[in-house]
Image: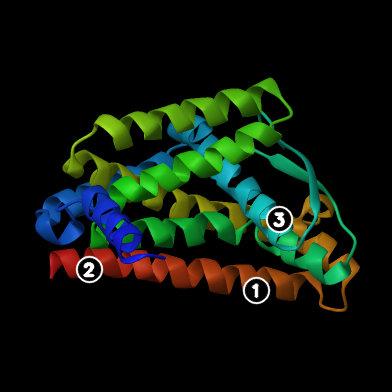
Amino acid sequence: MTAEASGGVRGWFEDVRVDETLATMPPSVVLGFALAGVVLAVYGPAWRLAGYPVTIVHELGHVVAALTAGFRLRGVTVRGDLSGATNFWSHSTPGTLWTMWWGYPAPAVLGWGLVWAATHGWARLALGVLVGCLALVFLLSRSWLTVAVVLTTGVAFGLVGWYGSAWLCTVVVYAFAWLLTVGAVRGLWAVVRAHASGRGVQQSDAYLMGRRSVVPGGLWLFTFALAIGACAWFNVASVLTALD
């Protein structure tokens, strides 16, 4: 890369980076928008709508993992009960396990990344990345509901990222990060209950991974919990830092 091109890239990143971060906001604002994301994830009527983007991110985790494993994707479907499916053609057991693993942790991992972006001034860039990821899912959508959810979410993030102030970009990214994080915990709890009761466990990623490997489904669940717990703790620390 030439010095001129390198300078152009640095200049572009400087233009995209925003001055508003969690550190520049009053602690009450940081706490308030964290709680807003939590409420969307735990309040039943709100979750029936806010849960769709979390499901999309769950499936996005499968999509990205499948692409890194070299698999061919057939489509993504989101259903009215907030469940989803990513269909892919696999040709190796390790790659299949890798692809299946990334569903439940994906919202928490992305939530961690968004909190990092809101902390370091990259909220606007994060919104652009989200729109790009949603465009990928849009191309793979195999139902009208999936198309509607992806378009609505993508347009909303695109408008905020393009027209919104630095403050708005940061708080939207931060609140969405908390929605994803608590949504990941909620999803993990649901699958743990399914394993404990035996009801619907056959659709569990952990159960299917156990069937395909020597590692039991319960241990796969434990790895989900470790990843989600680590990301959740990082996000809790961001609130504690702001309140300090």
Q: Which SS class for mark 2?
A: helix
The residue lying at 64 percent from left, 74 percent from top is 223
Snapshot colouring: rainbow
Question: How far across and down, in percent of the image, does residue 77 sit?
Answer: 71, 34
The residue lying at 13 percent from left, 52 percent from top is 28
Amino acid type for the residue under numbered disc 2: Leu
Report the side of 124 relative to 27 (left or right).
right
State the residue position of label 3. 67
Tell me the quarter of the picture where residue 163 sits.
top left
Q: Which SS class for mark 1?
A: helix
Asked if the residue at tag 1 contacts the one at tag 3, i.e. Cβ–Cβ closer than 8 Å, the answer is: no
Amino acid type for the residue under numbered disc 1: Phe
Mark 2 or mark 3, which is nearer the start of the sequence? Answer: 3
Question: How far across and down, in percent of the image, does residue 90 sit?
Answer: 87, 57
Q: Which SS class for mark 3?
A: helix
Mark 1 or mark 2, which is nearer the start of the sequence? Answer: 1
Q: Residue 222 got which mark?
A: 1
Asked if the residue at tag 2 contacts the one at tag 3, i.e. Cβ–Cβ closer than 8 Å, the answer is: no
The residue lying at 70 percent from left, 36 percent from top is 140
